[in-house]
Every structure is written in C-alpha cells, then in structure tokens.
Image: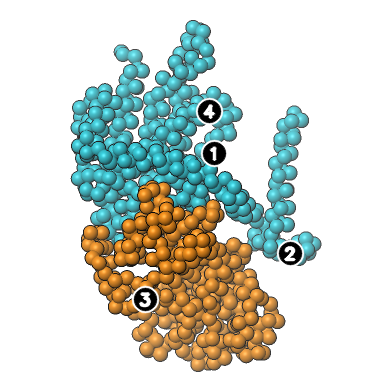
Amino acid sequence: MKLINKVLAVSAISLSLMPSIASADCGKARLADFDWSSANVHTAIVGFILEHGYGCDVEVTKGSTTPIMAAHYDSQLDIVTELWYDNIIANYDPVEEAGIIRNLGINTPDSQQAFYVDKTTADKYNLRTVMDMLDPEIAALFKDPENPAMGRMTSCISGWTCYTVNLVKQRVYGLDNYYTNFDPGSGGALDAAIAGAFAKNRPIFTYYWAPTGLMGKVDLVRLKEPPFNDACWAAMSQVVEAIKADGKDAYTPTCASEYRDMSLDKSVLTAWADTHPAETAFLEAYSLPTASVNALLAFYEDEADGDMELTALEYLENNSEWKSWMSADVAAKVSGAL
Amino acid sequence: MIRKLLTYLTFPIIFVWLLITSYSSSKRKPDSAMELLTDPSWLYDWPKWLDIPLMKWINDGFKVFNEEYGIYFEYVNNFLLGAILSLKKFLIMLPWPVVIGLVVAIVFFSSGRKVGTTIFVGFCTFFIGFLHPRFWDKAIETTSIMLIGIIICILIGIPLGISMSRSVRVRNAILPVLDLMQTIPSFCYLIPGIMLFGLGAVPAIIATVIYAVPPLVRLTDLGIRLVDTEVIEAAEAFGASDKQKLLGVQLPLALPNIMQGINQCTMMALAMVVIASMIGTRGLGDEVLLGLQQLNVGKATEAGLAIVLLAIVLDRITQAYGQKIQDRNTPPK
C-alpha cells in the first residue's frame, strides 16, 4: 500500500501545474492541491501571495487525498492549504508527533452539514429551527409529489452514513410525522434538485453541506438544532449503526444534536517552516470565512470557468483583510502585482 | 443549381460566424487581433480563444427556459406521476398470488398457450419476491415506471417509425437525432431533467424514453420498408388507398418487427433502472445502488438478479407475442 501511495504521489508530482518564477528570497514552495474546488481556491490565493509577495518559486501538485497526503508526509510537498483534519486524524497525528509536519490552524472556520430551507420561505413563515418545521401547514409547502400527504425533506444519499443520521434525527425531532426522508440518489442529483427549486422559486427543505460552489449561488437558511454534544452524538451514532446493520426497525429513542462543524486546517513541513519564518507566519494567519469561500467557489465555477488565478485575483482585488496577514511591504508587493 | 450553391454557401458563412463569435466573446483573446499576425505561437497549442461558447449558450438558454416554462413541466410531472402512482397503488393493493396469476395468464395467452414458457415465467415472477421480500413492492414500482415509459415510447416511436418509412427526407432528419439519443451519456439529460421535473420517477421516465425509443423507431421503419413490394403492388391493384395500405397491409406485416422493437425498448428501459435510482427513483435500482454504496456485494447481486428476472418476464411476454404474430403471418407450408 505504501509503495503504491509513493508511486501515485511521484506521478502526481510530475504533473506540476503552475509555471514558476525563480527568486532568491524564498526558493521553492511546493504546494499541494486536491481534486475539489474549495482546496483549489485556497491554493490559488496562497500561491499568488507566495509568488508575488514573497518571491517564492511556486509549484502546485494536484491529486486526490491519499497520494497527496502521502507525498506531504514523505516531505515531498511543503504546504497543504486545505486539510480535512477530522477525516485523517489517524494518519496525520503520528507524522506530526514525529516532527515532520506542523498543523498551522484553521483555513476555513467551519465546514457545515445541516438542514436548510430556502431563504424566501424561511423569512415568510419565520422558520428558524427544526422545531418550526413541525406544522402540517408548513409541511404542505414542501409537498412530496410522490407522497402528497407528507412534506419532502430532500436528504443525504442512501448508503452514506448521513442518510441514516438524518433518519434518526427526523425521528428524534418528530419530523418523520410530517416529512419523508427523501434519498436523492446521488450528489449531482441533490445539487440539481436544489438548483432547480431556486430556478423555479419553489420552497425546498433539504440536507446540505458547505463549503460548496452551490452554497455560494443560492440563499439557504440553516435551521437551528440542539447544539452539538459529544455524549449525545455518541448515543445517536450507536442507533445509527444499529439501523445500518438491521434496518429501520432497529430504531430506539435516542438523543440527537446538530452535526459538528469541522474546521479545515492548513499544514506545512516543519523543515520548510523553520527556514521560512515570514511565509509561515502568513500561512498561520491565513483564514477565510466560510461565506467568502462559498462566494469564491461560485465565481470559480461560473465566471472564471475553472481558472484558479482569475479566482485568486477576484478575491485579492475585492478584499483587504489579507493585508493584515503579512507585513506592509509584502502586501504592497502583492497589490502591485494585481 | 443556384439553390444548391446557396445551400453550400451557408455552411462556410455559419462557420466563419462561429469563429468570429467565439473569438470576440472569449475572455482570453489577445489585446489586439494584430498580435495574431506578429506572434504565431497560437499555431502550436490550441489557442484558448478558439472555443465556441456553447456551454454558456446552453446554460443561459436552459436558465431562461426553466424560468419561463418550468411551470408547464410541473403539469406534465404531476400528470405522469399521477399515472405511475395509481398504477403502482393498484398493483401493490393486489395480493401477490393474484399478480403472479395475472402474469401467468398474460404469458399463456400471448404466447399462444405454450405451457413451458408459461411455467418458466411464473417461476421467475415468484423468485423476484423469493429473493428478498422487500423486492416484491420494489419490482412493482419499477414495473409501473417502465410500463408508463413503454407506453410513451410506443406513442412516440411507432408514428415516428411510420413517417420515417414513408419519406427519405424525414428519415435523413431523424436518424442523426436517434444516434444522438443512443450515444449521449444519460447524465447529460438526467441533470436538466431533475431541474425541470424535480427528483424522482418522472425525470427517470423521460430518460428511459430518450434511451429506449430509438430501437423501436428503427425497427418500425425497417419492418414497414421490408414488407414485400409485390404484396404492396397487389394491394394497389385492388385499389387500396394509402391509409388502407398502411393499416391493412404494411403494419400487420411489419408487426413482428415492431414487436421486436417493443421488446428491445423494454430491455433498454430496464437497463436504465439503476441509473434512474441515482436521481432518486424508487425501485429495484436503488437496492443495487445501496448495495454498492455499502460495499455489500451480496445485496447488490441479489437486487441485480431481481432485475434480470424482471427482464426475463417482460422479455418472454413480448417475444412470445411477437412469435405468435410471426407464426400467423407465415403461410402454412
């Protein structure tokens, strides 16, 4: 397995994307990038600042999580701009303890998973929490055409854990009396269902997550649930596992709370950080609010047509918060390059 | 002659117009067109500005279309959904032995009282529920969606096939469209289908029709054209009108081919079942999908087998009926 990872990583590295501009100050900065848009956006912005502000020779390598992280653990990539830390704790922590890499803290404060309602409907009927949904008249707004007596809650994809989690949450909150737990079948279909409802100005009640490009294009209001609590989540997880194993009848009354908002982090090679204190300080300070990331993702997909540099320019030209992450002369250099 | 020249001229004009539009609408074009002459580097790699903005046209067009006419699609959606739901409700309401009995009766009479086929199909039907009790209702759900899909296919496919067989022009116009329908990846029309109709059975039916109707059209066209010219001449000699010729001679003689088309249509519709479940259609397909997403090979295979059994049942019914007509059409030796 390790060998395969290495081979994959090496072949990924040979596909460096960005042309580089040599400079004496900083030397090489090898950025890791992933095959999803939010990571692309962070890499584009960080890459632009490192290149034009610090004069680094930026190299970007793009790939999927396993080979890219393997290359990072193996000191082949200096900087990871978006780290889904919670998902890879078991692999990441030993390498960090060995002193090879360093977690540089949050890049986006929260990735969210929750139940959402479109803003128009939420404002009109004052829907703020999941409990506000417990009303036959509200349920009628979201009528399920295949089961007209109920409302439709477009849920997660059946077979994913979140589908069963949503099922349990519905039962605990009492939503199952009013709404179906509708499986959209695939991620693309869920996106299309949400986009379609907005195009036609139809009410929609759905499970969704952020940061995503679609979240930057549509106005969804997150419904409040009981706050996250470890003990409660553990109890619920047991019921979820039981249902996954034995079917819906295995449900037993339990506790339920909102999904935990995961923070996404940044990571850097210790060796690189030690020789690049100024750059590391910038990376440590770098953090974008989730809403900005959503907006940038929408821009990246629609306007920039997948052009990373254009997206980075869009952010840097229309915001100024980034100037506080670096010294004034570096900020001036970046501004000059815009 | 001049007309022909004019038609030939329109193509280069359209081509040049496309080139100019793509150049002028590109965000990545050089600062001035003169640069193209002085710097020939664009000849080595495909230049970024040489790009038809088709994506933008489709997106903008679809957006306007959805906003303006989306509401009409909801009417279609509600109508079709109503048809599926009532068919499903009726079939689920029946006790399962009655449904098996009905299938057996249909096979028995449509196959011309062949006992072997009838018993085989009866067992296949029984085994769908026997594989997993949950599959019975799911199979009925799948069948209702398919039946509605096939009815739409017949309503569209047979008239289209007839018109193709009667006019070379119509055939030349429709053939590339059929090619497109058969080869374009189904997700290209599934996703806009969801945006127009919402998640669930109706976009799946539309997708099924797009995917399954071409063989029916082709075989209807072929069947009618294959009817013996001597038979047609004989009919003409008796003074048959065009309508009489079509309804009395061509269609009955083409019926075995048309039945083959309906059979192919049914099989292709079943092939869409799993893909349809990826857009939230209930049925046997979502069992396969669930099995795959949970890495449960047994579950996926079990559901896959149920789809095969359903296919066998529907295939035998349509095949047997086609065979019966074929036997009737061939004169006894």
Residue type (three-letter) at the residue carrying disc 4: Met
Q: Residues within 10 Å of mark 3 (few under 14, many from 20)?
A: some
> Dot 4: what SS?
helix
Which numbered dot is residue B177?
1
State which chain is coloured orange: A
User: How much space separates mark 3 and mark 4, taking CA atoms?
Assistant: 64 Å
Residue A44, picture quadrant: bottom right
Give the number of callouts. Answer: 4
**Residue beneath disc 2:** B30
**How packed is label 4: few (under 14 Cα within 10 Å), some, or many (20 or more)?**
many
- Location of residue A185 with respect to B321 vertically, above or below: below
Residue that appears at 29% across and 46% down? B138
The image shows residue A243 at horizontal and vertical percentages of 25, 63
What is the residue that sits farthest to the top in this orientation? B238
Q: Depth-wise, is mark 1 or mark 2 nearer the camera? A: 1
Which residue is under mark 4?
B164
Badges 3 and 4, same chain? no
Are the residues under badges 1 and 2 in a single subunit? Answer: yes
Label 1 with label 4: CB-CB less than 8 Å:
no
* Residue occupied by mark 3: A228
Question: What is chain B's hue in the picture?
Answer: cyan
- Above or below, A270 against B29 in this view is below
Residue type pointed to by label 1 = Val
Q: Earlier in the sequence, mark 4 or mark 2?
A: 2
Cα–Cα gap, marks 1 and 4? 12 Å
Q: Position of residue B321 (x, y in %)?
A: 32, 26
Q: Secondary structure at mark 2?
A: loop
Mark 4 to mark 2 CA distance (whole Å): 49 Å
Q: Nearer the viewer, residue A190 or B31?
A: A190
